Image (tube, rainbow, N blue to C red):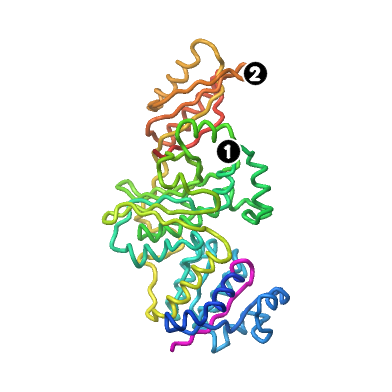
Amino acid sequence: MKKVGVAILGLGVVGGGTYKILTEHREFYKKNHGVDITVESVLERNEKRALELGVDKSKLCSNVAEICSNPEVDIVVEVIGGVEPARSFVLAALNSGKSVVTSNKELYCKYSHELEKTAKKNRVGLFFEASCVGGVPVIRSMLDNLQGNEFSSLMGIINGTTNYILTKMSDGGASYKSVLEEAQKLGYAETDPTSDVEGYDAAYKLSILSSIAFHTKVPYTEIYREGITDIENVDVEYGKQLGYALKLLAIGKNGESGIEVRVHPAFIKSSHPLANVNDSYNAVYLTGDCVEDVMLYGRGAGAMPTGSAIVGDIIYCALHPNHSYSTFKNTEKADANTKFVKNFESEYYIRLSAEDKAGVLSKITATFGKHAISVAQFVQDKEREGGKAPLIVVTHITKEQNIKKAVADINATGLAKVDAVIRVIS
């Protein structure tokens, strides 16, 4: 029976979950997979936490060098998060001839070119399933099950924190601020939630997933990013009336004009499968030329779901000694021949506060026409405080820059103010 020694860097939520799975399922893996996986070393500053989890004191290390020099360690699991010291630790492990499994999306997104180059040089494996969408096996599915497809698009809800917030705003009518505070108390959101609510977390994941799907490097710097901090309940409610659910979507498309990658709030038809992905659940909707549409759905975060993805990579690494790497030239920046679409197309929901008097509507309509924007739907609500009447506009497909120019022109007239612009996925 093959024996595999594992070292875990960090025993936080995910690291603790990984340790629990490996120790509790050891006999199961021996019986069903023919591999005996043992945790040989743990790097954790909080000794009390490690001992409470059941780690033998003799397995605790004070620095990564001890792990790198330990001949019993074959695979190093990095679950520290952030860039440093995680990057230095992973490079040290790879250079010592050990394969690495990581859940660190920011590290892998920003430095996969460096990490993969080091892994290749030392003929070891580099695995990162847990970096994207928690326990949902999106990466393995694209690499080892759906690799016969040419993907034209991927669209996903890939951040559990924002999905939880938007779900609660939709279901209960609570404000963004109150739901965020609730999410922080429940552990869904960090004390500093910026990475989640401003879309950085989703952009890192989209960079990784779209690079795999489209077989070319898609740096996160090429991704249009917009968070949910400006979302108001009134727009969530108007969207529901129009038959939409509001989600923070990560969208990647590969077409004749180039690659389009964006993260932003969007209304999606309530009949679409992604519209019913709620709370902290995640899902990725893939379109391949052979398989057509596939949706992968499940827990996007948490100790056990993410630990499941890490352990899956450990077992895969143990049973597949001939390591594979990116199908594309993995460099820091995009390939010079890769084109990115910046002026993308979409339908749009626009909420305006308009003066309730003759001629205003026709001037707004004329402004849209000037910028080649075709209006699909007008909805005018009752006049509110201050004599302004809320006006909802839903456009046909148009270009992003056309919308921005039209919004600037409407605001400049003084007859109306654009209060919200949200893209629509029909």
Look at the picture and state if 97 lies above or below 334.
Answer: below
* Total number of numbered discs in the rendering: 2
Q: Tell me: 315 left or right of 214.
A: right
Q: Which span is picked out in magenta?
A: 1-14
Q: Which of 395 and 24 is in front in this view?
A: 24
Relative image position of residue 42 (x, y in whole percent): 62, 79
Identify the secondary structure beneath mark 2. Answer: loop
The crowd level at tag 1 (other Cα within 10 Å; few <14, some 14-19, many 20+) is: some
Look at the picture and state if 385 lies above or below 211.
Answer: above
Circle 1: residue type? Ile
Q: Nearer the viewer, residue 80 or 58?
A: 58
Query: Is residue 387 covered in magenta?
Result: no
Which residue position is annotated with label 2?
A: 386
The crowd level at tag 2 (other Cα within 10 Å; few <14, some 14-19, many 20+) is: few
Relative image position of residue 17 (x, y in whole percent): 59, 70
Q: Tell me: 14 left or right of 100.
A: right
Q: Which of 305 and 71 is in front in this view?
A: 305
Residue 231 is labelled as: 1
Distance between the alpha carbons at the discs numbered 1 and 2: 22 Å
Look at the picture and state if 22 lies above or below 380.
Answer: below
